[in-house]
């Protein structure tokens, strides 16, 4: 008897290391832990940027001469954090960086990176972002099942821009439209993301195993009655106002008197670093600002309290990391933090008065050691179990039988009608996304319908039209 073919899971994402952004790191861990958890063949598909864009995006002017060099960097980074894991495939699609959106956008039809024989399950990390300007094979036609994972609260960011509420209104409808026509199911990491068709809320992210190890070491120190947390409060995050710095400096400035004695250190790099530093220097509190560094760095191990008032995140990775390290976390009572409510070291405030009270209380008490069960909840193993469950990707299900055509004359099947409407909608999107003028009106990067000669050469592809 012939053996059943292994299912193939392809994860498409919008960023790659060394850009330390959530959509570079989390899909990489998802691919690694899916390869470890099940009998699947796993491929991670990430954007390739030409040198000019690499200079704009990657830290410390890091450059790669070709995809193989960047792939080597990604494997080294992953293995340093997880140790040996089952191998999966990494392939690249052509991307361009939009300075206006601060995002990488796909160029050409990226469904072509996977052969039809392997087109079983597609996971679109940031499905709206990957499909806004998609022109080519329809995702649902190419893949048997398409799962979207919504990472970013785009509406919250857009609202903070000029004419933000009008833009947010349009974007909300466009996001709903594209996710509906291209995804069978959408996973929203928290209720902080917009409602989209066929979606379910579940946090399918975990923390880098290094943070769990740091937490275990701290637990050991506490159980041996050693002093384990010497430092006070800190915050780490990309230094742009929208990443919680607006809220944090407002709270510190308004409540300087009640918070006297608070010593706080902020770590981050970003476009607003100089302004954040200048605002912090005006306070009568001991607030110091330092450049960003890796959250697993030993400098952070001894801080006791992590203060994170950000409400633009969907599920804040640094909050999960701080909890894994055994710290007390002060954060806003907001849908993005719902997952953390079960952790006894997570204290949520709904008012400014409560923020002050919880902060001062946290500085005078010790964290509660994490139970094994809660530590597991933060891990990528648990996140992968949740993902497999809500995405309904195991076990493989046989293709649905199409209903017999000998139905009553003129009977209109509502499912068939819905499918036809969706087909028409997808056809319309495909048509307008093929016009350069229409693409540019909606914010696409000019000439991104096909990869240019330079990118084809770097990727080892045959240029279009040859």
Image: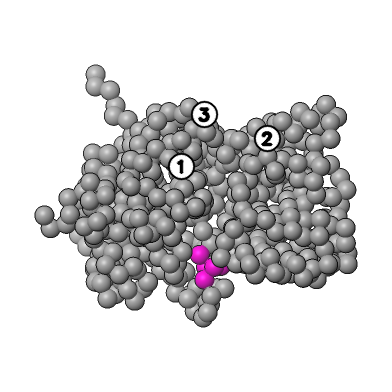
Residue at (70%, 31%) from the top-left corner? 216
Residue at (85%, 62%) from the top-left corner? 259
Q: How is the image coloured?
A: one colour
Which of the image's four quarters has the N terminus?
Answer: top left
The reply to whether residue 373 is visible in this rendering is no
Sequence order check: which comes first, mark 2 or mark 1?
1
Give the magenta part as a residue range.
Answer: 154-158
| Residue 155: percent from left, percent from top | 52, 68
Q: Report how far apart the C-alphas of labels 2 and 1 lie in the structure.
A: 21 Å
Q: Is residue 128 above or below residue 341?
A: below
Residue to which mark 1 is pinned: 28
Sequence order check: which comes first, mark 1 or mark 3?
1
* Tally of numbered discs: 3
| Residue 444: percent from left, percent from top | 34, 68
Judge from the rendering whether residue 134 lies leftward or rightward of residue 59; answer left or right: left
Residue to which mark 3 is pinned: 83
Sequence order check: which comes first, mark 3 or mark 2?
3
Residue 432 or residue 263, whichever sits in front: 263
Judge from the rendering whether residue 353 lies leftward or rightward of residue 234; answer left or right: right
The reply to whether residue 449 is visible in this rendering is yes
Q: Nearer the viewer, mark 2 or mark 1?
A: 2
Judge from the rendering whether residue 116 lies leftward or rightward of residue 103; answer left or right: left
Residue at (54%, 52%) from the top-left corner? 189
């Amino acid at each position: 008897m012939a053996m059943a073919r292994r299912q193939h899971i392809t994860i498409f994402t919008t960023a790659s290391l060394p850009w330390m952004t959530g959509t570079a790191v989390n899909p990489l861990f998802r691919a690694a832990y899916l390869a470890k958890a099940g009998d699947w063949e796993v491929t991670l598909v990430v954007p390739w940027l030409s040198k000019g864009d690499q200079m704009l995006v990657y830290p410390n002017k890091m450059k790669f001469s070709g995809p193989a060099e960047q792939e080597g960097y990604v494997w080294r980074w992953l293995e340093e954090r997880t140790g040996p894991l089952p191998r999966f495939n990494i392939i690249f699609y052509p991307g361009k960086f939009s300075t206006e959106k601060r995002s990488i956008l796909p160029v050409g039809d990226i469904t072509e990176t996977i052969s039809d024989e392997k087109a079983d399950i597609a996971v679109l990390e940031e499905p709206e972002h990957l499909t806004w300007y998609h022109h080519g094979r329809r995702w649902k036609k190419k893949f048997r099942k398409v799962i979207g994972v919504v990472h970013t609260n785009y509406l919250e960011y857009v609202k903070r821009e000029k004419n933000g509420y009008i833009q947010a209104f349009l974007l909300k409808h466009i996001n709903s439209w594209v996710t509906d026509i291209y995804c069978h199911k959408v996973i929203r990491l928290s209720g902080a993301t917009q409602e989209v068709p066929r979606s379910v809320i579940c946090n399918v992210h975990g923390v880098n195993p290094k943070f769990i190890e740091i937490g275990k070491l701290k637990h050991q120190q506490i159980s041996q009655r050693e002093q384990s947390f010497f430092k006070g409060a800190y915050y780490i995050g990309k230094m742009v106002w929208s990443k919680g710095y607006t809220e944090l400096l407002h709270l510190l400035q308004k409540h300087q008197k009640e918070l006297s004695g608070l010593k706080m250190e902020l770590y981050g790099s970003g476009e607003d670093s100089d302004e954040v530093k200048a605002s912090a220097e005006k306070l009568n509190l001991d607030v110091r600002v330092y450049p960003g560094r890796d959250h697993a760095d030993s400098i952070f191990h001894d801080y006791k309290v992590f203060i994170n008032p950000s409400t633009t995140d969907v599920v804040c990775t640094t909050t999960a990391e701080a909890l894994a390290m055994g710290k007390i976390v002060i954060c806003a009572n907001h849908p993005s933090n719902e997952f953390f409510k079960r952790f006894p070291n997570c204290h949520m405030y709904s008012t400014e008065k409560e923020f002050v009270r919880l902060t001062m209380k946290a500085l005078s008490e010790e964290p509660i050691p994490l139970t094994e069960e809660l530590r597991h909840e933060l891990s990528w193993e648990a996140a992968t179990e949740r993902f497999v469950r809500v995405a309904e990707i195991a076990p493989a299900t046989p293709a649905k039988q199409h209903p017999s055509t000998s139905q009553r004359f003129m009977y209109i099947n509502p499912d068939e009608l819905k499918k036809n409407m969706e087909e028409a909608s997808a056809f319309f999107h495909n048509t307008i996304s093929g016009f350069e003028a229409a693409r540019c009106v909606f914010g696409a990067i000019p000439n991104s319908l096909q990869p240019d000669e330079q990118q084809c050469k770097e990727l080892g592809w045959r240029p279009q039209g040859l």
